[in-house]
Image (cartoon, coloured by chain):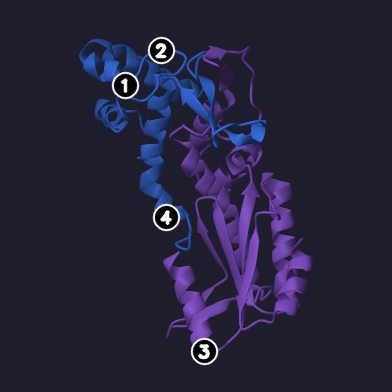
Amino acid sequence: MLVANEVIEEYKRKRKSCVFFKVDYEKAYDSVSWDFIYYMLRRLGFCELWIRWIKGCLESTTVFVLVNGSPTKEFLPKKGLCQGDPLAPFLFLIVAEGLAGVSRMAEEKKLIDSVEIGRDKVKVNMLQYADDTLFFCEANTKSIFNIKTILQCFELSSRLRVNFLKSRIGGTGVSHFLLRSFAAILN
Amino acid sequence: MLIGDFSEEEIRAAMWSCNSSKSPGPDGFNFGFIKFCWEIIKKDVMAAMKDFSVSGHCPRGTNASFLCLIQKVENPQQLGEFRPISLVGCMYKIISKALSLRLKKVISKVIDVKQ
């Protein structure tokens, strides 16, 4: 959050324009695909034994729903993480790293014009904190369009759907009209 | 470090980092009990951990959980106004806590600083 504030302050001061887009995932924890978690673990270099352990943890879950204190018949979930499981936040971080990887790649290939902050011109195009994600980019249609594409691809692979109703877009030094058109592209 | 057998200290650390008085899962035990009787049951717990680390899956029942619906608003009328919280059993919690403690050590190396 601190970094986000800094970016916005600096851009306001320099009177440059930037757009930020806050992503809200629809039922983030409940909809993560397990296959994507295994894939990410493999990509991050975890060994097969670890993946088997995680698999064992996830796939052995059985759930009873407590209604007014009495449990219903059990069912077996096929995706998603349980809120209350100590492993869940870490696995979610690993999933989110997938998105971070894509956005880094987009930065390298100049698909998103990231914002630059500080004297060292540190490039930032995305900040993540648990299941909150904030994209930054310069105000041009190309970047917005590519963010949209990235989010769509990420949805297809990880099953994390963006809830556009709850997502927010904002900008400094950008006209209201332009922001509207960006929002229309994203949605 | 990541794939070695689970040591007793590790399990102990995992257990003691869990809150003693959380609502129990389907097995009906909370951590207060397990910590209190640790000396008695530690052999069985260690055997279960060993079994898990070799076979890689939890026996049926250890990973059952109660899905408790907690209301987000005063008078909920739709399912969307509930927040599902799962109450997991003790044994699974120990396993998953031990794994997450190991994961914690390496996570900073694999995850982007921007997160």
Question: Which residue does the numbered mark 1 point to in the structure image?
Answer: B31
Label 1 with label 4: CB-CB less than 8 Å: no
Along the line of sight, the residue nearer the viewer: B63 or A178: A178
Question: Residue at position x 67%, y 32% from top?
Answer: B78
Q: CA distance from mark 2 to mark 3?
A: 60 Å
Q: Is residue B3 left or right of residue A13?
A: left
Residue A148, located in which quarter of the rendered image?
Answer: bottom right
Q: Which chain is purple?
A: A
Along the line of sight, the residue nearer the viewer: A85 or A11: A11
Tell me which numbered mark, 1 or 4, is placed earlier along the sequence: 1
Residue B34, located in which quarter of the rendered image?
Answer: top left
User: How many numbered circles does the render carry?
Assistant: 4
Q: Counting other residues with Cα less than 10 Å from the Cα at mark 4, is it few (<14), some (14-19), or many (20 or more)?
A: few
Question: Which residue does the numbered mark 2 point to in the structure image?
Answer: B28
Residue B45, located in which quarter of the rendered image?
Answer: top left
Question: Which residue does the numbered mark 3 point to in the structure image?
Answer: A14
Along the line of sight, the residue nearer the viewer: B58 or A80: A80
Chain letter of the residue carrying label 1: B
Chain letter of the residue carrying label 3: A
Question: Which residue does the numbered mark 4 point to in the structure image?
Answer: B109
Co-location on one chain, circles 1 and 2: yes
Q: CA distance from mark 1 to mark 4?
A: 31 Å
Tell me the amino acid under the disc marked 4.
Lys
Q: Counting other residues with Cα less than 10 Å from the Cα at mark 2, is it few (<14), some (14-19), or many (20 or more)?
A: few
Label 1 with label 2: CB-CB less than 8 Å: no
Tell me the amino acid under the disc marked 3.
Lys
Co-location on one chain, circles 2 and 4: yes
SS of the residue under disc 4: helix
